[in-house]
Image: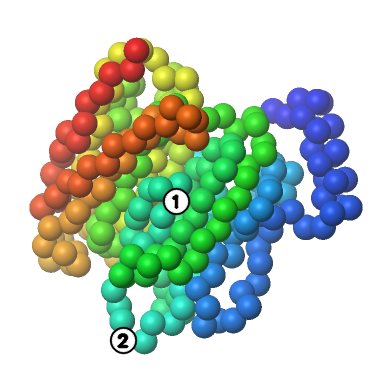
Amino acid sequence: MKTPAATALALVFASMFAMVGTPSIAQVTPSSAGDTTVQRPAGGWTYSGVSDDPAKVSYAYPSNLIDRGGQRGRTLIEGRLKQRGTDRRTPTLVVNGNAMPLYSGDDGSYSRPYAFGPGSNGIEVRDAEGRTIKHVQFYEANRSKTTARVRIILAWDDPQAELDLHVITPDGGHAFWGDPILANGGGLDVDSVDGAGPEMFSMTAPMAGAYHVYVNYWGNFGASGYHFDEKTRKRDVISARITLVFDENTPAERRETFSVPMRKIGDLTLVRSFMRG
């Protein structure tokens, strides 16, 4: 619930925006359909909560089959890839140093969810050769968005496969698609149900003890919904990329990245156990 102070602050910033122009989070029209764009978030300074429309429910590309409800506040990274002709190799989206495959529609449009924290954030689109073709940097000034002291990100390289992130916390909490928001304050900010991720666990005040990170190859999906037909996936072996980020966006930031092969539906792999003091 918004407090009177927060409402007053929002009005102050809204007045500022009225004087200086549209806030940077607003969608920008691409200059040319042939260019690679990041339509939003836009570069520069932004204050989420003033310019966002909390009533708008957006969906990633391709459309989500499930609305997770409690995760409606996630931010979409939206844009368009330059038409690549016969080159169907998959480009890469890098968000705050975290890389994931970037799949798009027939017209080149893409939309991937992410949970941004306060401070400086970077978005980069790289081609199949690893060259940067678009870069956007923006500063999130809303300090009510707390910094994730533990963030775990899962992405994978088959858009028809559905992989799930599972995190066990020291008090026995189990964050996964069936219970995304934990009573201890941790949970899944992003649970992609539309292929290739990301799925993301965040905790702003991690408790002391042992954490366990698992990845499960749950199944596949297509136009008719979820199914368990092994033959429909794009790759014989799916590569899951799991990144652990500790004390994000602070001088003490540390990260670890793991690649895990997923060979068949039902695979459940312990990726990493770690301790927080």
Reply above or below: 17 against 175: below
Residue at numbered disc 2: 86
Q: Tell me the residue at 32%/21% (across/down).
A: 169
Q: Classify mark 2: residues with Cα within 10 Å, few (<14), some (14-19) or many (20+).
A: few
Residue at numbered disc 1: 95
| Observer able to see residue 79 | no
Q: Are marks 2 and 1 in contact (CB under 8 Å)?
A: no
User: Where is residue 166, by image quadrant?
Assistant: top left
Residue 40 on image: x %, y %: 59, 59
Residue 41 on image: x %, y %: 59, 56
Residue type of the residue flagged with mark 1: Val
Which is nearer the N-term, disc 2 or disc 1?
2
Q: Tell me the residue at 10%/52% (across/down).
A: 263
The coloring applied to the image is rainbow
Q: Tell me the residue at 65%/31% (across/down).
A: 143
In this image, 80 relative to 65: left or right?
right
Reply above or below: 111 against 210: below
